[in-house]
Image (cartoon, rainbow, N blue to C red):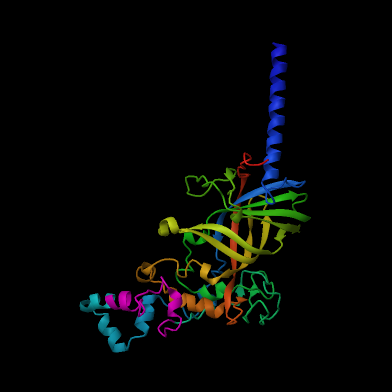
Amino acid sequence: MAVSNVRMEMRRTKCAIGLLVVLGVAVFAGGRVFQAAPQGQTRAFLIVESDQGFLYAPMEQECPQGFEMTVEESFLSQQTPAERERLLKPENAKEYQSKWKGEFIHGPGGENVCNNPKSFMNDPRRFVYRGTASKVAFGVNLDGTTDGRATKNTCAHQKFTGVNGEPAVDNQLYRAMGCSKLARSTMRVARNYMEHFLVEVRGIDDPKNDDRVEVGIYTPEDTPIQGSSGSPLPNQTIGITSNPHWRTMVAGRIVNGQLTTDVIPTLYLKWVLATWGPLGLQDHEFRDARFRMTLDDDGSLTGMMAAYRPIENIFTVGRCCGGTASVANNDCASEHKTLVAMADGYPDPETGTCTAISSVTNIKGIPVFIVQPKVDLSSRK
């Protein structure tokens, strides 16, 4: 019996050594992103909340003139008082619906304001939004100026004061959309603007002060397991995508408990538009992105990602159909015109018009375990 036990332990030891060798090869073969973890602790998080960095302060502070107009409200505002009164009579309901849901949201070529919002740039019926009146916003100083003056890489714009008193904060997406009824939603879906993604922090020697850590930002390969509340469960195991397009590594540092990353020139995360069917696979694109996060004592992560977002990559603009205007009552053409007017990053070299807008995504993550993508070694020599 004793001999048998010894042999069993030897087999277990050999299997363990073999597994470590295979894992070592797999991590090496994975390339730049999946090198062996540095010395120190590794922690991983599933981002379960991600909103667009709106303040949600009292309306009198943010939107003293009320919400931006919906498509229907915009249509009515452009009628004479007599015509508005006539159209709103019950007997004229069919004509009224036909005018604002049909004629008003379409251009001369038949396109509608949400299928092709760019084609309405010169349409006088589409207004630039007033924007938020708030002087305070979430964000960081993205352009490096104190006054928002134009630079080689930016257009002139107003600055905010940060929510914690930080000077010269940039968040023009909030300025543009902070009083939009749809964008300002407080429903649960508004806290999940992006699909779930993963943040991994490697090489943590001291969770309060560490001059060098590595931060990975990944799209998950797996669908997170949800609890009875509908929210993902903590401490589950999730695989990382095998597509390097949606995997990014960046250096960071921890100072007084706050983790800050270096600038990421371009960051892509997977984005699926279910209504588009096979064509629904898209990218969330962020330029000059940087993260500020806190590794909380309860094992969670909170923080923000600040970045410039290409206007054409923002969900509310040109990402759906006529129903977005006629049913959701959203004027995508006015949104597009507003984003162009308030954009502050990446000027077009020919026109000088900025093509991206500063933004913030507030994030919250729960602790998870992650699995590196499988690597096919059969083709390697």
Quarter of the figure that contains the N terminus: top right
- Residue in the image at 47% along x and 49% along y: 230
Rendered position, 110 above or below 40: below
Rendered position, 1 above or below 341: above
Secondary structure of the magenta portion, mostly? loop
Q: Quadrant of residue 357?
A: bottom right
Q: Quadrant of residue 354?
A: bottom right
Q: Quadrant of residue 101?
A: bottom left
74 lies left or right of 169: left
Rendered position, 8 above or below 281: above
Tell me the magenta residue range.
98-126
Give the residue furthest to the front. Answer: 381
Q: Position of residue 118 (x, y in %)?
A: 46, 76
Q: Position of residue 97 (x, y in %)?
A: 28, 75
Choose between 277 and 339: the one closer to the eye. 277
In magenta segment, residue 214: no
Rendered position, 221 above or below 144: above
127 lies left or right of 42: left
- Residue in the image at 29% along x and 78% along y: 99
98 lies left or right of 23: left
Q: Position of residue 256 (x, y in %)?
A: 76, 59
79 lies left or right of 364: left
Give the residue furthest to the left. Answer: 91
- Residue in the image at 70% along x and 44% along y: 28
- Residue in the image at 54% along x and 54% along y: 196
In magenta segment, residue 113: yes
Choose between 134 and 83: the one closer to the eye. 83
Residue 214 shows in this picture: yes
Q: Position of residue 169 (x, y in %)?
A: 65, 73
Give the residue furthest to the top. Answer: 1
Choose between 34 and 25: the one closer to the eye. 25
